[in-house]
Image (cartoon, helix red, strand yellow):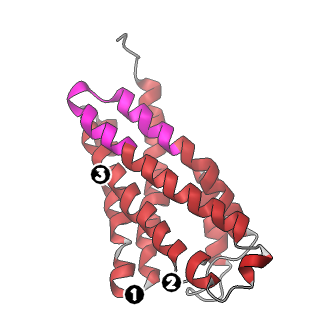
Amino acid sequence: MLVAYAVTLAVGLLSLESPQQPIADPMFSILEVLIIIMMPAMVVLMVAVHAWAPIHAKTLSLTSIIFMGLLAEVTCSLHFVILTLSRQPEFTAQPWLPLVLSFNWPSVAYALDILGWDVFFALSMLFAAPVFWGSRLAAWIRVLMIASGVLALAGLSGVVVGEMQLRNIGIVGYVGVFLVVSALLGVLFYRTTPLEA
């Protein structure tokens, strides 16, 4: 799902005539649906990290689940509302619609999206990273989780300076780097022999 999201996002961004434009339909709607479908899997991935984590790191991995759950709640609610309400005539006729449900800065929807991905996702990665020690594979996962979280946090610079193109730094973290993290986690879990509790 993350690969499908990354490809759709790349196609959507490449189709823009100007970097200031938001991604248009049908790519925008496909991205919305993919996010909603992807979020439960991302929460389950963090639950798997928690199950894998050694006892001394369980508090960190549980905190990671909580932040991923917050991301899922915020982003699924936001994108479901945009998919279902933003095209309804009762909403499209309102002059305030762009300030509430658009991805043009500033808007409520954009601010919530930033909270979810540049804050909650980043914190989930940064709390999960210290769980991984020992093997070279675990070390790579730790380093890439830290990179993913730091890049996502760096996306907040767009809000600070009012330049939303800087948010693309965060996108590199939570799409590009996280894709590699997810693949490496799959390899790690495949290689790990389950222990009886």
Identify the residue at image location x=71%, y=68%. 85
Give percent across and percent down for residue 74: 50, 58
For the residues labelled 3 and 2, the Cα–Cα distance comes to: 27 Å
The answer to whether residue 55 is magenta is yes
Magenta segment range?
A: 42-65
Q: Is residue 144 visible?
A: no
Q: Quadrant of residue 86?
A: bottom right
Mark 3: give few (<14), some (14-19) or many (20+) Cα within 10 Å: many
Prevailing secondary structure of the magenta residues: helix
Q: Nearer the viewer, residue 85 or 166?
A: 85
Q: Are marks 1 and 3 in contact (CB under 8 Å)?
A: no
> What amino acid is labelled 3 in the image?
Leu
Q: Looking at the image, is mark 1 or mark 3 earlier in the sequence? A: 3
Q: Residues within 10 Å of mark 1 (few under 14, many from 20)?
A: few
Does residue 55 show up?
A: yes
What's under tag 1, amino acid-wise?
A: Gly
